[in-house]
Image (cartoon, grey):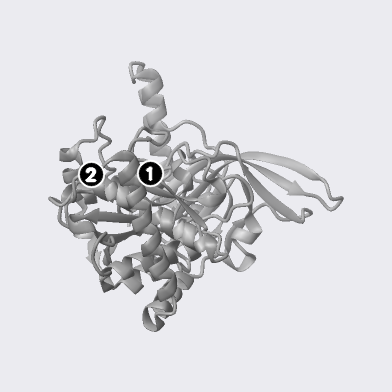
């Protein structure tokens, strides 16, 4: 489950790079039924999609959307001029018009959308990348430049690109990497719009990229087909029912997730190690910087990890708040029953040196991923061998001897064990 290598970070993200990115991960793509894709995002979204698809109760709303959509495009054509049919700008304009039409119709029917569309084709996000569009939590729509608020991405191509276009899929994979760089996520949603306005939905999990055909952008001068109504319904269901934070690993109380109640996140039955109990009623973590400082985050496949600097805070019996130690928070996904917290606890009990002292560990409470995510809180063990190499360039023979001695000490202490076999923690 641990990734073998990170994706190469290219300075210039051009078509060749995106083709290579897709080629490196093509085996992860798996076609699924659309209802299965939606169920990965939210059971409510899946149920609403199935209900409306089976009953057609939303037909009047869909017809209102198509009428509003066509009217909006006529207005844009009058003010901005005609665009070549089938070109990327053509589908870019029509996609924005459709999202806008759905928002207007929902609001006219007394429904406040949860997500807002942003045309980011010419408006880069904070790392200067420009997906063709993003869906942002409406409450934070003013901060549309931050990848952590992005709930879904959209990449658009012209009529020369088929639904399995390598560049489009590579761009969506790069979007997924950006979405998860600082915000731990269970999954990520992307939409690809290609030849003749065909729309494909992609959901990235830790072990696959699942996709399904959604439908087509509505045409402007013909009767609306079932594929086109399906596309309108899909977007309407997303805007109306998809929780903008559906993919977040950690529940938020402030900002992205800079204030964490560890007991709520990991209830006692799920705790492996808890050194924070005692006379304190409650303990929380405050993230010092809401950007991860390290971890295996730049990966498409396998166990992603995020590490943050944090401080422990206690609520005392007297109702006051006391600050505790500075610690490291680690969030990660594990694919098997082997928990790092168990191994870490055992290594600490054996007094293996150069391993961070574990303060708190357990499985994150998550119905749709039982036991699949874990949280660890540990003291900082100091600089790594890599850090020493950077600082000294290993020009000093004493540094080399020190590093080798420390590492050998750790291996010997770990191998002594307790008679149950060799144990080596990967964080030495």
Q: Compared to 351, does 389 lie above or below? A: above
Q: How many marks?
A: 2
* Quarter placement of the N terminus: bottom left
Under circle 1, the secondary element is: loop
Q: Is residue 254 visible?
A: yes
Which percent across, then down, holds residue 142? 53, 41
Residue receiving disc 1: 119
Between circles 1 and 2, the one closer to the viewer is 2
The residue that appears at 43% across and 63% down in the rendered structure is 238
View extreme (top): residue: 395
Q: Quadrant of residue 294?
A: top left
Residue receiving disc 2: 83
In the image, taking residue 32 as reference, residue 386 lies left or right, namely right
Front-most of residues 387 and 107:
107
The residue that appears at 34% across and 68% down in the rendered structure is 37
Q: CA distance from mark 1 to mark 2?
A: 17 Å
Under circle 2, the secondary element is: loop
Q: Is residue 4 visible?
A: no
């Amino acid at each position: 489950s641990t990734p073998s290598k990170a994706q190469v970070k290219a300075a210039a993200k051009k078509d060749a790079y995106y083709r290579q990115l897709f080629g490196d991960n093509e085996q992860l793509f798996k076609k699924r039924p659309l209802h299965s894709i939606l169920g990965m995002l939210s059971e409510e979204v899946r149920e609403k999609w199935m209900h409306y698809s089976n009953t057609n109760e939303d037909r009047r709303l869909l017809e209102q959307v198509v009428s509003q959509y066509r009217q909006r495009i006529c207005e844009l054509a009058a003010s901005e001029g005609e665009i070549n049919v089938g070109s990327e700008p053509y589908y870019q304009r029509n996609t924005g018009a459709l999202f806008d039409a759905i928002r207007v119709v929902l609001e006219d029917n007394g429904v406040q959308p949860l997500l807002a569309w942003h045309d980011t084709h010419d408006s880069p996000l904070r790392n200067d990348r420009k997906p063709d569009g993003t869906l942002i939590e409406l409450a934070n729509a003013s901060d549309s430049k931050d990848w952590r608020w992005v709930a879904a991405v959209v990449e658009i191509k012209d009529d020369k690109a088929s639904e399995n276009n390598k560049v489009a899929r590579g761009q969506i994979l790069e979007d997924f990497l950006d979405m998860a760089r600082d915000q731990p996520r269970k999954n990520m949603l992307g939409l690809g719009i290609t030849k003749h306005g065909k729309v494909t939905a992609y959901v990235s999990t830790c072990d696959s990229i699942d996709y399904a055909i959604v439908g087509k952008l509505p045409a402007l001068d013909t009767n609306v087909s079932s594929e086109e109504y399906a596309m309108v319904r899909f977007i309407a269901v997303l805007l109306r029912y998809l929780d903008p934070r559906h993919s977040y690993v950690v529940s938020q109380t402030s900002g992205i997730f800079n204030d964490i109640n560890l007991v709520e996140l990991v209830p006692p039955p799920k705790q492996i190690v808890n050194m924070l109990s005692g006379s304190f009623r409650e303990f929380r973590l405050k993230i010092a910087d809401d950007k991860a400082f390290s971890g295996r985050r730049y990966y498409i496949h396998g166990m992603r990890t995020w590490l943050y600097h944090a401080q422990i805070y206690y609520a005392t019996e007297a109702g006051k708040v006391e600050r505790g130690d500075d610690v490291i928070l680690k969030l990660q996904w594990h694919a098997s029953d082997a928990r790092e917290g168990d191994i870490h606890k055992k290594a600490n009990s054996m007094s293996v040196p150069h391993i961070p002292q574990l303060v708190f560990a357990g499985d994150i409470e998550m119905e749709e991923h039982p036991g699949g995510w874990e949280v660890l809180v540990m003291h900082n063990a100091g600089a790594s061998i890599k850090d020493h190499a950077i600082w000294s360039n290993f020009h000093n023979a004493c540094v080399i001897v020190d590093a080798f001695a420390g590492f050998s000490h750790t291996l010997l202490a770990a191998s002594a064990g307790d008679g149950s076999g060799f144990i080596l923690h990967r964080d030495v």
